[in-house]
Image: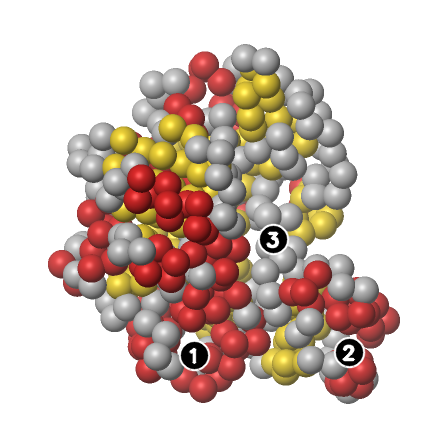
Amino acid sequence: MKVLIVGSGGREHAIAWKVSQSPRVDKIYCAPGNAGISEYAECVDIGAMEFEKLAAFAKEKEVDLTVIGMDDPLVGGIVDVFEAEGLKVFGPRKNAAILEGSKAFSKDLMKKYGIPTAAYENFDDPEAALAHLETARMPIVLKADGLALGKGVLICNTLEEAREGVRSIMTDKKFGAAGNRMVIEEFMTGREVSVLSFVDGKTIRIMTSAQDHKRAKDGDQGLNTGGMGTFSPSPFYTDEVDAFCKQYVYQKTVDAMAAEGRPFKGVIFFGLMLTPNGPRVLEYNARFGDPEAQVVLPRMKNDIVDVFEACVEGTLDQIELEFEDNAAVCVVLASDGYPVAYEKGFEIRGLEQFRGSADRFVFHAGSKYQDGRIVTNGGRVLGVTALGANLKEARANAYEAVELVDFDNKYFRHDIGKAIDEA
């Protein structure tokens, strides 16, 4: 069969790598793709938001299944366009992708259906938001309502910081139209855990847990990024946490979306905070996390194409997910200066040392071919992932693998997975 993957980052590279292992697949396309993805797929120069062109391409090439990796096209309604053309596509429709596309919607959904989350208020007017802050407890969390590349969340420790945050999001539009509405919510403390799941509209199958590192610098300092590294499984995601979430979070979310007339098919990413008072939902995403996919998919035993099709066809209840009894750690190699300002176009050296390896992988996030060489083409450049019998071994293997690849301006955190020492 033929598969088209839409996207160009490390997540899409991990998906392409996993799809390439399916004996059912003999041709993979990726639009627009990147230099690393081209090892498994034919990259096509069509942007992820060019829905009509993508659908026309899928029809022309007789693509059997399209997988949407990115949040923007999902929230924009790409699945609806493909379905209208009679094309099989993996991902939520526009009315379900709002679960990620609007934080105000997701918070209201959780309140309505009794899904545990932080106390909050939604605001359309910056003056009303500023007035609310005057009686709020600090620290407090401000969230732009819409998509903001994982950076639209501000944690404010003082009233003045919070006031400035409101002005930044709602008045100055730092995150564009994503800041037309804003959520102000209580600050929660505890461990953060990411749990990915497959959903077919009614049935949910939970993948293995992971834990992301969002801050740019060691010790969780610096600005929020799209993710500087991750590990799986999380030692803090205990059997007790799993049982709680299965009762109060996972299926309840799927049922709530169905009850709202927004049946969800695809991947729901649950961002959880393990507070002293129990797990709470921080956020939902409507697709694989990046870089979480880079540690979860290498541990997955199933043929991912079978799972994709079960989600689309509503037969996920016939699938049992299986994961290796091991661990994975991913360290993101970025361009120094990310997420603010950075240079591109530097040659990436050492990639050949990963070819054919069964326990270390390099997933490209921002790369391209230039004059026959692979060069940097983004803030996050590569995700270096390694497996191990346990988290400590996987972490040691990942940092060994980081030294195998190099480029000018290379930057990475040195403490990805350090929290496992405290588990």
Q: CA distance from mark 3 to mark 1?
A: 25 Å
Residue 28 in sight from this viewpoint:
yes
Residue 342 on image: x %, y %: 74, 34
- Image quadrant assignment for residue 58: top left
Q: Quadrant of the N terminus?
A: top left
Q: Residue at x 59, y 60 (%)?
A: 147
Q: Residue at x 58, y 81 (%)?
A: 119
- Residue that label 3 marks: 149
Amino acid on which the number 1 mark rests in the picture: Ile
**Disc assigned to residue 377:** none
Give whichever of 23, 332 is nearer the camera.
23
Residue 388 in sight from this viewpoint:
no
Q: Residues within 10 Å of mark 2 (few under 14, many from 20)?
A: some
Instruction: Say left or right for 401 vs 232.
Output: right
Which of the marked residues, 1 or 2, is nearer the chain's N terminus?
Answer: 1
Amino acid on which the number 2 mark rests in the picture: Pro
**Disc assigned to residue 126:** 2
Amino acid on which the number 3 mark rests in the picture: Leu
Instruction: Say left or right for 77 vs 304.
Output: right
The local secondary structure at tag 3 comes to: loop
Which of the marked residues, 3 or 1, is nearer the chain's N terminus?
Answer: 1
The local secondary structure at tag 1 comes to: loop
Q: Residue furthest left?
A: 318
Residue 207 on image: x %, y %: 32, 54
Give whichever of 132, 180 is nearer the camera.
180
Image vertical order of residue 192 relative to residue 377, above or below: below
Q: CA distance from mark 1 to mark 2?
A: 28 Å
Which of the marked residues, 3 or 2, is nearer the chain's N terminus?
Answer: 2
Residue 415 on image: x %, y %: 60, 39
Q: Residue at x 63, y 82 (%)?
A: 121
- Residue that label 1 marks: 115
Q: Residue at x 40, y 36 (%)?
A: 30
